[in-house]
Image (spheres, rainbow, N blue to C red):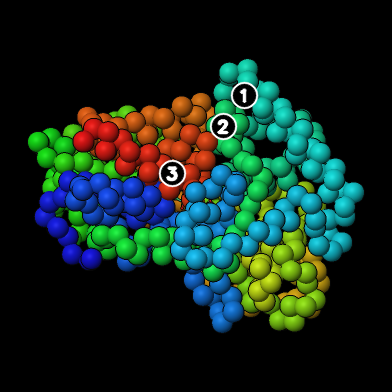
Amino acid sequence: MSSLPSEVDVAIIGAGAAGLGAAQALKNSGLSFVVLEARDRVGGRGHTIQAAPGVIFDVGCGWLHSADKNSFVNIAGQLHFEIDRTLPPWRERAFGKAFPQKERDDFIRALDAFYDRAEQAARSGRDGAANLCLEPGNRWNPMIDAISTYVNGCELDQVSISDMDAYEDTNINWRVRHGYGALMAAYGAPLPLAFNCNVTLIDHSGRRLRIETSLGTLTANKAIVTVPTNLIAQEAIRFHPVLPAKVDAAAGLPLGLADKVVLALDEPEALPKDGNLRGATMRTAMGAFHLRPLGQACVEGFFGGRFAQALEDAGSGALAAQAIDEIVALLGSDFRRKLKPLAESRWAHDPFARGSYSDALPGHAGKRAVLAAPVDGRMFFAGEATSPNFFSTAHGARDSGERAAGEVLRIK
Ligand SMILES: Cc1cc2nc3c(=O)[nH]c(=O)nc-3n(C[C@H](O)[C@H](O)[C@H](O)COP(=O)(O)OP(=O)(O)OC[C@H]3O[C@@H](n4cnc5c(N)ncnc54)[C@H](O)[C@@H]3O)c2cc1C
């Protein structure tokens, strides 16, 4: 479907993991519904592209985090998508001489001690910025901050200790061989969708909700809003009358930034399959590299936080150029001719995402529950930022959509 019905029982706004999870849960409810999506595709921050022949690239989410508790694992089974159970090399191994094992072990000890201090601080019940849990003067602090830019999309001074502690991670991470975004596309394919349908206003002043979109107006009894927090906070989607508690909650849960780049690799045999590459460079502004993901002839780079923002702002191609410079510095100048840019993300510049994943600002961990709460029994909220402990993930988003659909059905 790509045209807009004039009225439905339930309008779902956004066809990312949350919107699709909500729609799947309403499928056999007897209610009429439509998913209104601003883009011309489903998946939102889940998007797989064929970057080159033989190179599949997840521009957004790639890992089935907490795979033993991840609802997309069963869905992949039902839709006949192969799961690769190779665990990521993030903690245990690093390729080459750039980060010798002894140094790496020392770093991991410092990182674990930081997380222990954060857990203790969270238990004390007083929230604050997570950088307060760094050991003053520890030589690994800039690299611990770099990890935060990958995990939270921002530096530790922007991260709530309580929120960081609430995140649930079983440390089992798998992948969808043909792409997480491709799995989402298959999951969404049978649903009623209106594409290129940018929702600008939800008017809840009358008996029915009146929803203004770029394709025209429709009315609904209920709506499930799943758009990223930055769009609510910046009022790219508005409510009439305004919902100040929602705007405030969304502003406390901004999207941090993580960007990915994929480089074609000549003579791939020289590098290990699923290898990890990074240097002990003692900087926060640096990338992390995944060598030959799933055995493909490529290298994936990952950048986060203020550094990713600066690279995006520098223009298209800056991420790839930085990745190549860093890899050459770690592995030698030969690699300059072996690596060719294929694709890179620009999530901060994406008008329908405006960032990568939510993180709670210090003092704002409670805002996830505020954002998730229904309004007047007819406006419901989902999306990764509303997940109590799987926030920032695709499965957390999907499950939140299912939760919101359950709320809709309970108030039927
Ligand atoms: C680089 C990167 C790497 C990541 N890595 C992982 C990972 O490895 N594992 C993991 O689990 N998660 C990862 N994530 C996070 C994961 O992708 C997201 O948490 C999840 O996909 C969010 O789903 P969502 O439905 O909440 O939001 P979205 O996917 O953003 O869906 C919201 C939808 O709403 C649409 N929309 C926005 N505004 C409007 C409007 N006004 N009208 C209509 N439609 C609108 C958007 O186009 C979008 O399709 C990553 C994200 C990024 C960016």
Q: Few, some or many C-alpha atoms within 10 Å of disc 3 (few <14, some 14-19, many ≥20)? A: many
What kind of residue is marked 3? Asp
Q: Which numbered disc flags the more N-terminal residue, 2 or 1?
A: 1
Q: Earlier in the sequence, mark 3 or mark 2?
A: 2
Residue identified by numbered label 3: 399
Distance CA(mark 2)–CA(mark 1): 9 Å
Which residue is denoted by mark 1 in the rendering? 122
Residue position marked by numbered label 2 in the rendering: 166
Of discs 2 and 1, which sits in the foreground?
2
Q: Position of residue 49 (x, y in %)?
A: 49, 71
What distance separates the C-alpha of mark 1 from that of mark 3? 25 Å
Q: Nearer the viewer, residue 197 or 248?
A: 197
Answer yes or no: disc 1 within 8 Å of ligand 1. no
Q: Mark 2 belongs to which amino acid? A: Ala
Residue 272 is left or right of residue 301, and the answer is right
> Identity of the amino acid at label 1?
Ala
User: Is 224 on the left-hand or right-hand side of 336?
Assistant: left
Crowding near pointer 1: few (<14 within 10 Å), some, many (20+)? many
C-beta proximity under 8 Å, tags 2 and 1: yes
Is residue 178 in sight in this rendering? yes
Quick check: 106 left or right of 19?
Answer: right
State which mark lies toward you, 3 or 2. Answer: 3
From the image, which quarter does the N terminus lie in? bottom left
Question: Residue placed farthest to the right in the image?
Answer: 102
Tell me which corner region of the image, top left, top right, bottom left or bottom right, holds residue 270.
bottom right
- Residue depth check, mark 1 versus mark 3: number of the one nearer the observer: 3
Q: Is residue 370 above or below residue 278?
A: above
Q: Is mark 3 within 8 Å of ligand 1?
A: no
The circle drawn on residue 62 is none
Give the x, y percent position of residue 188.
36, 60
> Would you say residue 322 is visible in this rendering?
no
